[in-house]
Amino acid sequence: MSMEFRETKLKGLYIIQPDVKGDERGFFMEVFRKDVFKENGLDLNFVQTNHSRSGVGVLRGLHFQYDKPLGKLIRIINGDAFVVAVDIRKNSPTLGQWVKEDMSAENKTLMYVPEGFASGFCVLGDVAEVEYQYTTTYNPKGESNILWNDSVLDINWPIKNPIISDRDKDANSFNGWLDKPESDIFKL
């Protein structure tokens, strides 16, 4: 089995298409294989897996962890979602740029979001169940977020009035985050 790795315009951010074998019984695919990822420039060790479920109209993000920065492998295991990753690395030539991918249980696309990126998603159908594999353990005291509709980022979300958490309503602006001393952790 093989996987197709496509590095995006944002260095270190990959869209991965697994090789899916299927027939009338169903399908089989490898989601992560350390040697194959390493051959494609991603030498990763995952230490935690999370699973979320969100209903129609929900938007989660833009989230990241700065104290014990983490990378995450994202996949949709039920439904479909518009997934976004934003480069928040200071001095990066692509600082503030973002990549989006329509991901679904059907297309089985994966996104690897490295350290120094904020990510989020919105549900495109009735539901989206998202699985995240983390390269370090979750630290609630070392996480932060950026406003999903920040005018500097100008992300073209496919829903205009999403359901968001209070935490995401009170998120930093993009420039507000960059002004914080904690943002220096992501300097190139």
Image: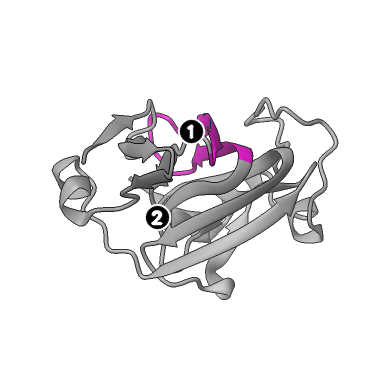
Q: Residues within 10 Å of mark 1 (few under 14, many from 20)?
A: few
Query: Answer yes or no: do the residues labelled 1 and 2 have beta carbons within 8 Å?
Result: no
Q: Check disc 2 and report the residue beneath it.
A: 71
> Left or right: where does residue 116 sit relative to residue 86?
left
Q: Check disc 1 and report the residue beneath it.
A: 107
Q: Residue at x 62, y 38 (%)?
A: 80
| Whether residue 63 is visible | no
Looking at the image, residue 141 lies above or below residue 121: below
Residue 46 coordinates in the image, percent (x, y): 33, 64
Looking at the image, residue 90 lies above or below residue 45: above
Q: Residues within 10 Å of mark 2 (few under 14, many from 20)?
A: many
Q: Residue at x 36, y 63 (%)?
A: 135
Helix, strand or loop status at disc 1: loop
Residue 1 coordinates in the image, percent (x, y): 21, 41
Write down the region rendered in magenta: 80-105
Q: Quadrant of residue 10?
A: top left
> Left or right: where does residue 94 sit relative to residue 165?
left
Which label's residue is closer to the chain start, 1 or 2?
A: 2
Camera-side mark, 1 or 2: 1
- Which amino acid, mark 2? Gly
